Amino acid sequence: MWFAVGATVGAFVIVWFGLVVLLYVTRPDETTLADTARLIPDVFRFVRRLATDRTIPLRTRLPVWLLVGYLASPIDLVPDFLPVVGYADDAIITAFVLRRLVRKVGDDKLAAHWPGTPEGLSRLQRLLRIPQPG
């Protein structure tokens, strides 16, 4: 029994360390956490606008609705009460879905639906590692 508990704890530590390394490696070069936090209200409005735009095919919008359900659900891949890793899975999944959505809709829709400043949009594109036009 103690072997199983030790193996479980060891596996958890390895996964936690792997996620921390992944977050460190994939972070944007010059964007700080404070810069990212300032984008949150604009990103919420942006996602809502894209998710409700009926000119975008449903198969493109569906992952956004699934993401909203996942984030609202109390059940996570990694529980949120765990330090760093608890929210890391949410951030990674959110970035993946947003990156996919932004690439599918194109630059025109992106600019049309972005509620913030052009600098904020540029920062979001850097965070998601999406090539910027021009």
Image (cartoon, rainbow, N blue to C red):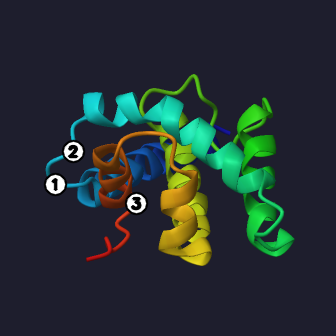
Q: Amino acid at mark 3?
A: Leu
Which circle marks residue 47 in the picture? none
Residue 34's quadrant in the figure? top left
Residue 65 vertical position relative to residue 83 in the rendered view, above or below:
below
Work out how far the residue at label 1 is from the one at label 2, CA to CA, in angstroms.
6 Å
Q: Residue drawn at (27%, 53%), measured in percent from left and top? A: 27
* Disc 1, SS: loop
Q: How many marks?
A: 3
- Tag 2: Cα neighbours inside 10 Å, few (<14), some, or many (≥20)? few
Q: Which residue is mark 2?
A: 31
Tell me, yes or no, if residue 55 can be seen here.
yes
Residue under numbered circle 3 = 128
Give amino acid for label 2.
Thr
**In which quarter of the view is residue 104 placed?**
bottom right
- Judging depth in this view, the residue of 102 and 75 nearest the camera is 102
* Real-space Cα separation, disc 1 to disc 3, in angstroms: 12 Å
Q: Are marks 1 and 2 in contact (CB under 8 Å)?
A: yes
* Amino acid at dot 1: Asp
Q: Which residue is mark 1?
A: 29
The residue at the point 48 percent across, 59 percent down is 111
Q: Secondary structure at mark 2?
A: loop
Q: Is residue 6 visible?
A: no
Rendered location of residue 55, percent (x, y):
79, 69
Q: Position of residue 88 (x, y in %)?
A: 48, 42
**Location of residue 10 in the rendering, given as x and y in whole percent from the top left corner:** 46, 46
Query: Would you say 54 lies left or right of 11 here?
Result: right
* Left or right of 18 in this view: 111: right
11 vs 101, left or right, is: left
Viewport quadrant of the C terminus: bottom left
Gap between marks 2 and 3 measured at Cα: 11 Å
